[in-house]
Structures are given as structure tokens and as C-alpha cells.
Image (cartoon, rainbow, N blue to C red):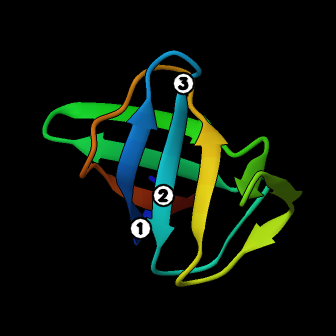
């Protein structure tokens, strides 16, 4: 079972382009596995790319607000967890 660490929350979601804005409370990098959870809805994914102010970044830190594509819609306020094997 993977360990889960809370790393942020979804502050916005753009339906048309499937992009979530995450307010980070811990570092995140491209390649990390994450779980976005809201009630009984869970979206697990690997971070393939993220942006800060429309510029692609490999890593982001606590306090950063990042945009990333999600495989399906997620809810505003959903909690983002980093998964560690």
C-alpha cells in the first residue's frame, strides 16, 4: 500500500482543458504519483507536466500555485496527496 502525504488543495479547475490549479503546501515534481480526493471520488495520476504562470517547471515548492493537466475532471477543494511506494 502506498503512503499518502497531503501536499495541497485544488483551488480552480478548468473543464474545457482539464487543468487543475493546485495550491501546494509541500514540494512536488514531474514524475511524482499523486491522488486527488474529494469525498469518494479519487483520481490517481502521475504528474506529467506542470506550469507556474504559464511557464513549464520540473519542480514546485510549498506556497507555489501550479497548473497541471488531469485525466478527468476534479472538484475545487479536493485534497491532493503525494503517493510513495
Say few, some or many: other residues with alpha carbon within 10 Å of mark 2 (under 14 / 14 to 19 / 20 or more): many
Q: Nearer the viewer, mark 1 or mark 3?
A: 3
User: At which x and y percent is residue 51?
Assistant: 74, 54
Determine whether the residue tagged by mark 1 lies in a helix, strand or loop: strand
Q: Which residue has dot 2 on it? A: 22
Viewer-proximal residue, 49 or 46?
A: 49
Residue under the image location 21 percent in, 42 percent down: 38
Q: Nearer the viewer, mark 1 or mark 2?
A: 2
CA gap, disc 1 and disc 2: 6 Å
Residue under the image location 13 percent in, 40 percent down: 39
Q: Which residue has dot 3 on it? A: 18
Query: In the image, 69: left or right of 8?
Result: right
Determine whether the residue tagged by mark 2 lies in a helix, strand or loop: strand
User: At which x and y percent is residue 18?
Assistant: 54, 24
User: At which x and y percent is residue 65?
Assistant: 55, 67
74 up-or-down from 36: above or below: above
Say few, some or many: other residues with alpha carbon within 10 Å of mark 3 (under 14 / 14 to 19 / 20 or more): some
Viewer-proximal residue, 85 or 7?
A: 7
Q: Which residue has dot 1 on it? A: 8
Amino acid at each position: 500500500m502506498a503512503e499518502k502525504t497531503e501536499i495541497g488543495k485544488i483551488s480552480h479547475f478548468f473543464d474545457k482543458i482539464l487543468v487543475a490549479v493546485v495550491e501546494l503546501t509541500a514540494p512536488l515534481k514531474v514524475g511524482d504519483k499523486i491522488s486527488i480526493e474529494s469525498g469518494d471520488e479519487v483520481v490517481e495520476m502521475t504528474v506529467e507536466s506542470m506550469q507556474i504562470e504559464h511557464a513549464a517547471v520540473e519542480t514546485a515548492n510549498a506556497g507555489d500555485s501550479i497548473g497541471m493537466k488531469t485525466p478527468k475532471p476534479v472538484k475545487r477543494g479536493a485534497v491532493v496527496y503525494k503517493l510513495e511506494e
